[in-house]
Amino acid sequence: MSGPVLRAEGLGYSVGERALLQGLDFGIAPGAPSFVIGPNGSGKSTLLRLLHGLLAPSQGRVVQAGIGRQAMVFQKPVLLRRSVTQNIAHALSLAGIRDAARIPAALEEVGLPHLAHRPARLLSGGEQQRVALARALALHPDILFLDEPTASLDPAATRAVEAILARAAARGMKIVMTTHDLHQARRLAGEILLLHRGRLIEQAPAETFFQSPASAEAQAFLRGDILE
């Protein structure tokens, strides 16, 4: 597929009279991961939920092309009071998938086969996030949304999650991810979307964005300045 897998057309989202996102027009192409960055409160998480369909737009629409199954992983994983295996099995059941072989394969993919029968909620934060990733990957999604999945993790756990995502992207899975970690974006992103005050300021290949940002806002953001 050469065209975008997702397209925002006049996309906006408001709560009462407060516009969290407004006038977004862009496409997200297949291929390397797309990272959404921006200051706190810029609308990153809201945008991800709109693209995934968890929220309905107040204005405009999200158009999907050629996407089959999709999944989402949040900053703080929501796990059932069950074993790791049962958490993944529950997700497969909700999706109507009856292929138990996907469970050990997903746990192998995230490096947790030895924890298959442990209570998921008793694991460390990094292990819980990898369980959440296994649960998502077991669905074999065409597109995986991630909302700051490493924000609460230590460096070792962060690198473990990044390695999992890099392997998934190398297999052709489209990843759309928010992050506040610019070093992480440099390591993983194929393209960058910069949000500020609910508007898309800049969208560019990652190398171009970090080496020669086009907008004054992007230049200030990369310097670490507070955007007004």
Image (cartoon, rainbow, N blue to C red):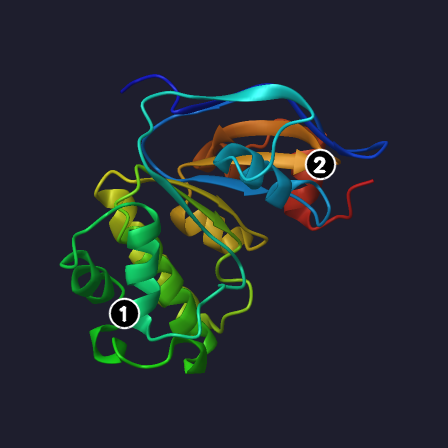
Which label number is shown at residue 85? 1
Residue lying at 40% horizontally and 37% vertically, measured from the top left? 190
Residue lying at 35% horizontally and 17% vertically, measured from the top left? 3
Q: Is residue 24 visible?
A: no
Tag 2 residue: 196
The answer to which of 122 and 170 lies nearer the viewer is 122
State the image coordinates of residue 75 (x, y, percent, origin top left): 53, 59
Residue lying at 37% horizontally and 80% vertically, measured from the top left? 119
Number of marks in the rendered image = 2
Q: Residues within 10 Å of mark 1 (few under 14, many from 20)?
A: many
Q: Looking at the rendering, in which quadrant would you find the N terminus?
A: top left
Which label number is shown at residue 132? none
Q: Looking at the rendering, in which quadrant would you find the C terminus?
A: top right
Q: Residue 70's quadrant in the figure?
A: top left
State the image coordinates of residue 116 (x, y, percent, origin top left): 25, 75
Task: Give the secondary structure at mark 1.
Answer: helix
Q: Residue 88's quadrant in the figure?
A: bottom left
In this view, 128 is above or below 207: below
Sequence-wise first label, 1 or 2: 1
Task: Give the secondary structure at mark 2.
Answer: strand
Of circles 1 and 2, the one toward us is 1
Q: Is residue 47 left or right of residue 168?
A: right
Residue lying at 46% horizontally and 48% vertically, measured from the top left? 186
Q: Is residue 177 left or right of residue 59?
A: left
Q: Is residue 117 visible?
A: yes
The answer to which of 146 and 202 lies nearer the viewer is 146
Kind of residue indicated by mark 1: Thr
The answer to which of 113 and 225 lies nearer the viewer is 113
